[in-house]
Image: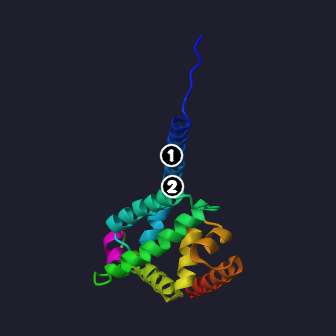
Amino acid sequence: MAAFYMSEELVGILRQERAASELQTQVAQLFEESREDVYRYLMTLGLTPSRAQDATQEVFLRLYAALKGGEEIENPRGWIFRVAHNWGLKVRARHASENPFDADMEAKLAAPAHDAEHDLLERERMLLFHRAVEALSEQQKRCLFLRMEGLRYPEIAAAMGISPSAVGEFLRRAMERLKKVRDE
């Protein structure tokens, strides 16, 4: 029986291909688990749906490139949201001359057919809420939106480059301001 011998070069190539396949599987799984959350988060940054979709894909391409380049990422979900945050802000800045989200118009278009009084009260309530959210500091809004996407304090902290205690404080202040609007 003849022994089969593989050169070290062939073994190295096979290992690289196996590692690349495992890496693709890992990124694909993260994409499936997190793409909707990232997309919604990018929408909260003010990106249009098509730009948010493009930016979401860019974030995961950057994740693949970073991992392929040997970067060790301890918290991939936090890393993804940090990159999404930074990339989303860049995309938004590039297209700042476009019309921003108009809460009044959205409320008019999305309101189902009810009686006029109910519609007016609901629009007023939503307008007050949108104004209250817009009045929050940038850090409070980012923390709030990331928390709404299901991230924990340490993940939010990693995504924003701040401490978990700062995340807690930003969220506490944001909730206080929003509760005041609700109670008025």
The quadrant in which residue 42 appears is: bottom left
Measuring 42% from the left and 73% from the top, which residue is drawn there?
88
Q: Which residue is mark 2?
A: 68
- Asked whether residue 82 appears in the rendered view, the answer is yes
Q: Residue at x 57, y 61 (%)?
A: 71
Question: Amino acid under label 2?
Answer: Lys
Q: In which quadrant of the rendered view does residue 7 lie?
A: top right
Q: Which residues are magenta?
A: 105-112
For the C terminus, give its image quadrant.
bottom right
> Residue at (53%, 64%) from the top-left corner?
80
- Identify the residue shown where x is 37% and y is 81%: 93
Residue positioned most to the top: 1
Disc 2 to disc 1, C-alpha distance: 8 Å
With respect to residue 134, does 29 lie above or below? Answer: above
Instruction: Find out whether residue 108 is within the magenta segment.
Output: yes
Q: Position of residue 154 (x, y in %)?
A: 67, 70
Circle 2 packing at 10 Å, graded few (<14), some (14-19), many (20+), is some
Helix or strand or loop: what does disc 1 sit on?
helix
Q: Determine which of the numbered discs, if any, sits on residue 144 in the image.
A: none
Drawn side of residue 152 relative to residue 119, left or right: right
The spot of residue 51 in percent (x, y) is 34, 68
Q: Which residue is mark 1?
A: 20
Q: Position of residue 33 (x, y in %)?
A: 53, 53
Q: Residues within 10 Å of mark 1 (few under 14, many from 20)?
A: some
Dots 2, 1 in contact, CB < 8 A:
yes
Residue 30: percent from the left, percent from the top?
53, 53
